[in-house]
Image (cartoon, helix red, strand yellow):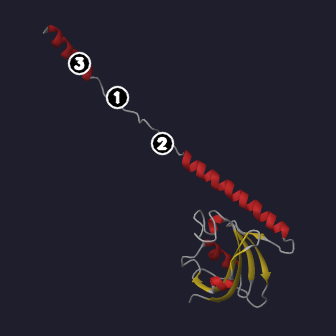
Amino acid sequence: MKKVAALCCGLLWLGCASPEARRPLNTPKDTFLKNSANHNKMRFAQEQKQFKIVANNTPELEFTVSEKGFWYALLEETATATTSPKVGDQVTINYQIESLNGSLIYDEATLGEVEFLVDKEDVIPALREGVKVLKPGQKGLFLFPSFMCFGVQGDFEKIGSRQSLRFIITLVAIKSEK
């Protein structure tokens, strides 16, 4: 009996010690996000190198690099138009999509004439940003990185995952927002 009482007292004495905080077994790591960001930066740099090769292979065109990361060259100039589309303007365009090597993926007849409100309708970023550098009547050749086109998923038909593309866009008309 004395041994049991001593054991109970010992356990009570140990149980009264201050609680010690439990440490998590798995510490959170942001390595996935860092790896993903690094992968995307490397992918973007690789696409920019491909654009440079395309530009070097077409010396008759003068390419401009935009702040958004796409490259473009004007194919047809227009002397009459002076303004580019602004947010809310309704634009009418014709366009075709090609691979970077120039192989036709979708032609203008298949895609048809497209109308949308600049920055107010859900169209792919390539079209949304591309029309902003054109004036009515101008036609441009655009080299778009994959994130501005169909991204990781592609279009589930002819355009693959993470595919950089060439667009030839003609800005047919602008109707200004009133």
35 vs 158, nearest the viewer: 158
Disc nearest the viewer among 1 and 2: 2
Name the image quarter holding residue 54.
bottom right
Q: Position of residue 39 (x, y in %)?
A: 64, 52
Q: Could you tell me the amino acid type at mark 2?
A: Pro
Locate residue 174 relative to residue 28 in the image: left or right: right
Q: Which comes before the other along the chain, label 2 or label 3?
A: 3
Q: Mark 2 points at which residue?
A: 28
Residue type highlighted by circle 3: Leu
Earlier-in-chain disc, 1 versus 2 = 1
Read off the residue under disc 1. 20
Residues tagged 1 and 2 counted as in contact (Cβ below 8 A) = no
SS at circle 3: helix
Q: How far apart are marks 1 and 2 (CA)?
A: 21 Å
Q: Name the residue under label 3.
A: 11
Say which residue appears at 45% left-offset and 38% top-offset.
26
144 is higher (above) or lower (below) than 5: below
Q: Where is residue 5 in the image (x, y as percent from the top left)?
A: 15, 13
Indicate the amino acid at tag 1: Glu
What SS does tag 2 mark?
A: loop
Whether tag 2 and tag 3 are in contact, CB under 8 A, the answer is no
- Name the N-terminal-most of marks 3 and 1: 3
Element under disc 1: loop
Which residue corresponds to the image point at 74% horizontal and 79% vertical from the top-left?
Answer: 140
Q: Which of 64 and 104 is in front in this view?
A: 104
* Quadrant of the drawing holding the N terminus: top left
